[in-house]
Image (cartoon, helix red, strand yellow):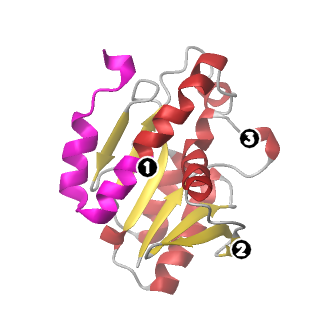
């Protein structure tokens, strides 16, 4: 059993905001694989797919650790079998970066998860949203611009490829593929 948690904030006002890229990723997988309606468990929406639980915590970003730790505890999984998908301002918009472990890099959702699980050794897939020009809060909670929305399907297809590589191979092979990938913004 593995868990993939996409981070975001509940509520229609947060739909298609930069901070909800993790939720967008889970929604993409759910729609692409016709997984139907969510079950509500662990203070989250969740779906079963393959030998995986897809999780969208409903705790708001800054308390994501409550939901994720409850699911990890319930399924008794090793942390290497948990993948967190979230937005990252340190990466250009659309750039993906996978890591096996590390600090939270100032991301409050990941800070919450690391605190709840007591470990930095949590695999994660970061989706670049670019740097804020003004207010960081307004930027991450701001809605995607039309040109960003246009690129979203391509980004989510690459997230799907990254997720499937992590599931079918291992974190090292997934990191090699994802981290060496050249996104359209790099060319």
* Residue marked by disc 2: 40
Residue 141 position, x and y percent, is 67, 33
**Nearest to viewer (mark 2 / mark 1):** 1
Q: Can the viewer see residue 48?
A: yes
The magenta segment is 160-187
> If the image is split into quadrants, where does the N terminus sit?
bottom left
- Label at residue 6: none
Residue 120 in which image quadrant? bottom left
- How far apart marks 2 and 1 lie (CA) works out to 23 Å
* Residue marked by disc 3: 14
Residue 18 in which image quadrant? top right
Q: Is residue 75 above or below residue 108?
A: below
Q: Seen in the image, is 34 located left or right of residue 108?
A: right
* Residue marked by disc 1: 160
Q: Nearer the viewer, residue 38 or 69?
A: 38
Q: Which of marks 2 and 3 precedes in the sequence?
A: 3
Q: Can the viewer see residue 120?
A: no
- Residue at image location 28% in from the left, 55% down from the top: 101
């Amino acid at each position: 059993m593995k868990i993939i948690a996409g981070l975001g904030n509940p509520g229609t006002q947060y739909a298609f905001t930069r901070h909800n890229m993790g939720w967008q990723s889970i929604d993409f997988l759910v729609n692409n694989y016709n997984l139907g309606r969510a079950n509500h468990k662990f203070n989250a929406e969740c779906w079963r797919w393959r030998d995986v639980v897809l999780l969208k915590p409903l705790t708001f970003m800054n308390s994501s650790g409550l939901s994720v730790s409850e699911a990890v505890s319930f399924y008794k999984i090793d942390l290497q079998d948990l993948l967190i998908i979230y937005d990252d301002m340190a990466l250009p918009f659309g750039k993906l970066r996978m890591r096996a472990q590390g600090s939270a890099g100032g991301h409050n959702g990941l800070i919450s998860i690391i605190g709840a699980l007591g470990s930095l050794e949590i695999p994660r897939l970061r989706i670049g949203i670019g740097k804020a020009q003004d207010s960081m809060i307004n930027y991450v909670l701001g809605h995607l611009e039309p040109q960003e929305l246009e690129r979203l399907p391509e980004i989510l297809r690459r997230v799907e490829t990254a997720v499937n590589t992590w599931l079918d191979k291992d974190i090292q092979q997934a990191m090699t593929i994802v981290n060496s990938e050249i996104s359209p913004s790099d060319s």
